[in-house]
Amino acid sequence: MAAPRGVSPVLVTGAAGFIGLHVVERLLARGETVIGVDNFNAYYDPALKTARAARLEARPDFTMVRMDIADHAALAALAKTAGVGRVIHLAAQAGVRHSIENPFAYERSNLAGHLSVLEACRHAGVEHLVYASSSSVYGDRPLNGDGFRETDPAESPVSLYAATKRSCELLSQSYARLYGFPQSGLRFFTVYGPWGRPDMAYYGFTEKMLRGEPIEVYGEGRMARDFTYVDDIVDGVLGVLDHPPPAGGHELYNIGDNDPVGLMDMINTLEAALGLKAVKVFRPMQPGDVTATFANIDKLQALCGYRPKVKLAEGLKRFVAWRRAYAG
């Protein structure tokens, strides 16, 4: 367990979110003081976000602030008044398909929100900003034996969500050069696990299978994803947090499992974890979806020794056990 880097609090945006919950719990476990920010929006059931927050709010070294990160004046005041030293920016409007129907939610949360975080960091004199990007920035490309590398082109997003995430990377690059505070962008690859997001395929499939309903399998089942268990993601997030670039530096890192799994294989694994067979209805590819993702993690391994530990069969067993305990 790494020692805390100084006494200043860590600000975590999206603290009531899926990844945010796990990141905050790990920070608290290693003795950090954490300020969480979340707006508890209704993209999915806010009761799940409230339940996550309740796990954190009982902790003496944690404070939850209900705030929209796009409120730049309020966020800047919070960061400066609290003496925040490091920021982990996870808040965003998620969902590739949702972005097609609700584009302005992505403009506010992902673009205005990211700029607001950058300005707050600049004025508070933050030592290191770690922020969430996405594997979606790579666009739709075939699998290869080496995986997607951070140096690969990322200029052809196929969804508005992906375009906003790539735009955030460029904003951060410019701010690092202009104002000198180090930044690290994390390209997450299909994160799953307990307390996960209900809009993710594995979660939605689970709910439908438990109700005896058919599941819709998009892309005719030919898609593949680099499913990454949330505990492994947190290892990477904190590894990056503890290894900032030099002043004015901006680095991008893939955080994935380095082992893409076909959608049908994932469904088979979920069936085994649930002890149920799914009734499958095959649908064509949806607008904004990509065929496959595959993280090359050499750069992150070289930085902090990152090495995923939890494979899909074990991770889905843990998710199913949590789901049954949480929802009955």
Image (cartoon, helix red, strand yellow):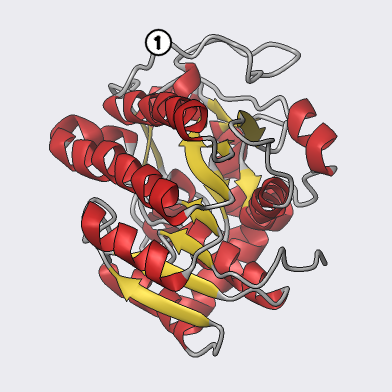
What amino acid type is highlighted by mark number 1?
A: Ser
Asked whether 37 or 313 is in front, the reply is 37
Vertical order, 44 against 312 (above or below): below
At x 59%, y 39%, the residue is 182
Above or below 232: residue 63: below
Residue 4: percent from the left, percent from the top?
73, 68
**Would you identify the image quadrant in which residue 45 lies?**
bottom left
Residue designated by label 1: 156
Q: Quadrant of the N terminus?
A: bottom right
Where is residue 164 drawn, in percent x and y? 32, 29
Specify whether residue 253 is in view: yes
Q: Classify 10 Å Cα crowding around label 1: few (below 14), some (14-19), many (20 and above).
A: some
Looking at this view, is 132 or 144 the one in front?
132
Tell me: 4 left or right of 255. Answer: right
Q: Residue 200 at x, y = what percent?
A: 42, 47
Instruction: From the viewer's perspective, tell me whether residue 172 is left or right of residue 148.
Output: left
Q: Is residue 328 visible?
A: no
Find residue 207 and report its horizontal and vertical position in percent. Answer: 39, 60
Residue drawn where x is 57% and y is 58% of the image? 193
Q: Residue at x 48, y 61 (%)?
A: 12
